[in-house]
Image (spheres, rainbow, N blue to C red):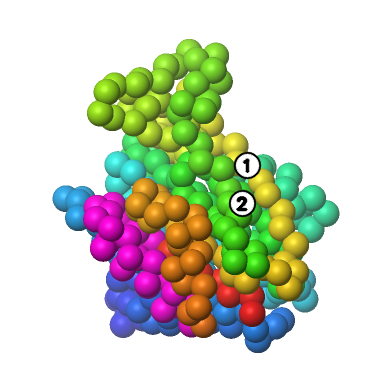
């Protein structure tokens, strides 16, 4: 095995995207607009299992157009599904024939198709799953967000936080889960769970729960005008201890995207978050 192959294996183990990783490259810039920068940070939680969060944070050129590709994948019962999403979800999205003409439909189709792939490979990927929030920035002008689970996308617009993703909580989708033959537990001292197990109503993988669990994403489209200052993507390790507005205000004065992402992770730990934490910040000014 060559040195490069060993390095790539190490990056894969750490659940960092390539080529942009917190260790190798702490941030980057758009070629379309040098005002747009991005940075990311991951932090292992105080749990007994290996790091289960993965992320993607990069720009690429496709069909002479620039795309910013940003995603947080928060695995559960292992990190194999999150890793699979990191390596395959954006490829599946961009390979959809209708990506440019109907991006929302392309995202939904790719999410469902990727989930099918994961279920078909459950013998290799295991019985775990992953939430996901993805954001595609098209030519620095249009932001398309999709998500399943409770990782969030939040923008700062003239100092005010605006959540673009949807927290898929079992209590909010109880009727849908029950219509599929499942149930939502509500045990005192615990959060609502699908079939008494999973604390989100939508996710990739989770083969044993899939009859009662959706992988269809919610989609939001935001035009990036002069009022939009930055985007935060983060796993629930951040949002469990910090409101959207608190997160926005915590980093609004910070110009460096990577420093802002690291600050949010550090602040979550200071507020006693014990979960894995992953965060991406994209600044538009």
Secondary structure of the residue carrying tag 2 is loop
Tell me, yes or no, whether the highlighted magenta stretch contains residue 262. yes
Q: CA distance from mark 1 to mark 2?
A: 9 Å
Secondary structure of the residue carrying tag 1 is strand
The residue labelled by disc 2 is 164
* Picture quarter with the N terminus: bottom left
Q: Residues within 10 Å of mark 1 (few under 14, many from 20)?
A: some
Question: Looking at the image, can residue 138 be seen?
Answer: no
The residue labelled by disc 1 is 218
Q: Residue furthest left?
A: 48
Instruction: Give the overall secondary structure of the magenta segment.
Output: helix
Q: Position of residue 73 (x, y in %)?
A: 44, 53
Q: Residues within 10 Å of mark 2 (few under 14, many from 20)?
A: many
Q: Earlier in the sequence, mark 1 or mark 2?
A: 2
Q: Nearer the viewer, mark 1 or mark 2?
A: 2
Which residues fall within the magenta stretch? 256-278
> Residue at the spot x=83%, y=54% of the render?
101
Q: Residue furthest right?
A: 101
> Residue at the spot x=72%, y=48% of the render?
104
> Residue at the spot x=39%, y=82% of the render?
24
- Horizontal side of 190 relative to 33 (left or right) equals left
Question: Looking at the image, can residue 284 be seen?
Answer: yes
Quadrant of the image occupied by residue 139? bottom right
| Picture layout, residue 28 above or below residue 231 | below
- Horizontal side of 56 relative to 90 (left or right) equals left
Q: Report the disc number at residue 123.
A: none
Q: Position of residue 69 (x, y in %)?
A: 59, 66
Q: Position of residue 257 (x, y in %)?
A: 49, 77
């Amino acid at each position: 095995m060559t040195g490069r192959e060993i390095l790539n294996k190490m990056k894969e183990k750490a659940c960092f995207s390539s080529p942009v990783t917190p260790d190798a490259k702490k941030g980057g810039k758009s070629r379309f607009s040098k005002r747009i920068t991005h940075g990311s940070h991951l932090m292992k939680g105080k749990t007994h299992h290996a790091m289960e969060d993965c992320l993607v944070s990069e720009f690429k050129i496709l069909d002479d157009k620039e795309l910013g590709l940003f995603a947080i994948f928060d695995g559960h019962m292992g990190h194999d599904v999150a890793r699979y999403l990191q390596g395959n979800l954006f490829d599946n999205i961009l390979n959809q024939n209708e990506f440019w003409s109907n991006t929302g439909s392309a995202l939904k189709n790719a999410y469902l198709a990727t989930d099918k792939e994961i279920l078909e490979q459950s013998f290799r990927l295991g019985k775990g799953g992953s939430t996901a929030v993805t954001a595609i920035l098209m030519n620095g002008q249009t932001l398309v967000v999709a998500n399943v689970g409770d990782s969030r996308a939040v923008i700062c617009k003239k100092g005010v936080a605006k959540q673009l993703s949807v927290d898929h909580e079992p209590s909010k989708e109880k009727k849908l889960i029950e219509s599929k033959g499942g149930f939502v537990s509500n045990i005192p001292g615990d959060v609502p769970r699908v079939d008494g197990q999973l604390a989100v109503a939508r996710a990739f993988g989770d083969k044993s729960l899939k009859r009662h669990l959706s992988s269809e994403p919610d989609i939001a489209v935001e035009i990036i005008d002069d009022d939009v200052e930055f985007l935060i993507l983060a796993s629930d390790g951040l949002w469990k201890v910090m409101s959207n507005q608190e997160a926005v205000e915590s980093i609004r004065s910070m110009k460096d995207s990577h420093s802002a992402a690291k600050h949010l992770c550090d602040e979550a730990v200071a507020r006693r978050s014990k979960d894995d934490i992953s965060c991406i910040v994209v600044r538009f000014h």
